[in-house]
């Protein structure tokens, strides 16, 4: 089962509506929307299913809508070195 | 106009104690006040606090202003992240060169003392190195593309007497490399080695760095507020945050290392001008009962004092003519490289000294 977690090398700040993060030597990336909330759940290794379930619960939203957003965000964070992907 | 300025003062006072005292009902903020707050100097640190107050619902903004505040806050946070990346490089480079380092001010306060790191902005990287290793540190950091922004009056003088040297990175970011925490006689009096006796771990990007210990961070904040020349809401907030964790009774142990409780008194009296309730009760009591040393009070800088005033005070405090000559010679006769960086000829420099006027770009 694939798990996702913040890279321990990430340097970041988060507000309720914005995540600013970088892994040197990449410059800081700013991501709005639910990125900060997702980031908070990535403190520990988590599967996409578990992440979607928690976020859907937090936002009282449909899991299928949340899943699309989560997958898009993970795809944005991973190439920047901001995620650790485990099996 | 005066009503608007009164409003501005009131909002600034409340932002500087955000999360430290009861806020009360949400406060609406119009575009004119938002303009004022967003245009304040970076060292005031108000953009982050305004963003945080809006984020937590304490301040209510119209949609356009909310977007402007979020954007400005995001820029400040991107800057902080960028500076933390540089801090990490600086500390790793110093460690590789065998130079011990302590993270100071912005990054340390943001991550160790502020209620949320995103509430604290900073504009440069501040690192303390052992007082006899400033030049070794400057040389080591050259590999990162860090160069002194202004060549010192002389390398030897900088290594023996300077409070700090400011280095500039190719990206434009600045690193303040400190060998002391304050200029002038108060800075010289503190036993610098004691700052390396202990420390507080600070993890940046998965790497454990070391900040000053809690009491030393508090004392540094006091010295910066009372002696640093520039102070504003962010400096006051730093004092209030640290005062909540450092009790007055713990300071007596640091007097033997040269710290002046008169400087602490001056800083905390200023911090105590905050909205009621922001200063912990034990600190109010300490301010009312702590004796003040008149000799130290006479050494406190007046508002607007420059490096020249601090240097004069240092010269007066230097013991004996040899020490005075050692301290003053390079200030009177600086290197050509220093004069070049300041855009001065030697004649202009000497004439300014004789007239007592400030040198262009005078600092630290």
Image: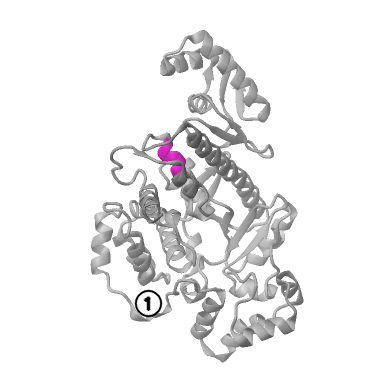
Q: Residue at x 24, y 55 (%)?
A: B281
Q: Dot 1 corresponds to which residue?
A: B297
Q: Is residue B195 above or below residue A76?
A: below
| Rendered-image quadrant of the N terminus of chain B | bottom left
Q: Residue at x 58, y 61 (%)?
A: B129
Q: Nearer the viewer, residue B17 or B322?
A: B17
Q: Nearer the viewer, residue B223 or A84?
A: B223
Q: Residue at x 48, y 44 (%)?
A: B48
On screen, residue B212 versus residue B95, left or right, reads: left
Q: In the rendered image, is residue B96 in sight?
A: yes
Q: Which residues are magenta?
A: B49-54
In the image, is residue B51 part of the stretch drawn in magenta?
yes
Q: Whole-percent x and y of residue B106?
A: 51, 52
In the image, is residue B127 part of the stretch drawn in magenta?
no
The chain containing the residue under callout 1 comes to B
The answer to which quarter of the image holds residue B84 is top right
Q: How many discs mark residues in the rendered view?
A: 1
Q: Whole-percent x and y of residue A47?
A: 53, 16
Q: Is residue B173 above or below residue B336?
A: above
Q: Nearer the viewer, residue B58 or A12?
A: B58
Q: Whole-percent x and y of residue A8?
A: 57, 34
């Amino acid at each position: 089962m694939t798990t996702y977690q913040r890279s321990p090398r990430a340097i970041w700040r988060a507000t309720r509506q914005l995540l600013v993060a970088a892994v040197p030597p990449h410059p800081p990336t700013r991501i709005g929307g639910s990125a900060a909330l997702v980031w908070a759940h990535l403190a520990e290794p988590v599967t996409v299913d578990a992440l979607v379930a928690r976020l859907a619960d937090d936002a009282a939203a449909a899991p299928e809508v949340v899943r699309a957003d989560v997958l898009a965000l993970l795809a944005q964070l991973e190439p920047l070195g901001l995620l650790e992907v485990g099996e | 106009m005066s009503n608007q300025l009164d409003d501005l003062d009131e909002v600034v006072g409340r932002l500087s104690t955000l999360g430290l005292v009861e806020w009360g009902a949400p406060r609406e903020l119009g575009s004119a006040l938002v303009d004022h707050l967003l245009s304040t100097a970076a060292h005031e640190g108000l953009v982050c606090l305004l963003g945080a107050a809006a984020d937590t619902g304490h301040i209510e903004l119209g949609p356009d202003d909310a977007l402007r505040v979020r954007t400005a806050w995001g820029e400040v946070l991107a800057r902080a992240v960028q500076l933390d990346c540089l801090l990490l490089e600086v500390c790793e480079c110093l460690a590789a060169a065998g130079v011990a380092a302590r993270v100071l001010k912005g990054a340390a306060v943001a991550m160790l003392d502020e209620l949320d790191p995103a509430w604290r902005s900073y504009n440069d990287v501040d690192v303390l190195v052992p007082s006899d290793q400033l030049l070794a540190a400057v040389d080591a950091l050259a590999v990162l593309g860090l160069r002194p922004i202004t060549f010192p009056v002389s390398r030897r003088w900088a290594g023996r007497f300077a409070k700090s040297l400011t280095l500039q990175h190719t990206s434009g970011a600045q690193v303040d490399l400190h060998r002391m925490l304050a200029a002038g006689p108060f800075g010289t009096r503190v036993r610098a080695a004691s700052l390396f006796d202990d420390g507080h771990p600070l993890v940046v990007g998965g790497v454990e760095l070391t900040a000053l210990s809690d009491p030393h961070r508090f004392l540094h904040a006091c010295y910066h507020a009372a002696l640093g020349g520039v102070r504003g809401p962010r400096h006051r907030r730093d004092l209030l945050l640290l005062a909540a964790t450092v009790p007055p009774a713990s300071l007596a142990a640091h007097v033997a290392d040269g710290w002046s409780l008169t400087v602490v008194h001056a800083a905390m009296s200023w911090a105590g001008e905050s909205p009621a309730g922001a200063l912990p009760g034990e600190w109010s009591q300490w301010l009312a009962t702590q004796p003040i040393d008149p000799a130290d009070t006479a050494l406190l800088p007046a508002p607007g004092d420059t490096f020249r005033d601090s240097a004069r005070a240092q010269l007066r405090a230097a013991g004996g003519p040899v020490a005075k000559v050692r301290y003053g010679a390079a200030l009177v006769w600086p290197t050509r490289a220093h004069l070049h960086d300041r855009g001065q000829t030697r004649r202009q420099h000497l004439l300014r000294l004789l007239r007592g006027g400030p040198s262009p770009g005078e600092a630290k």
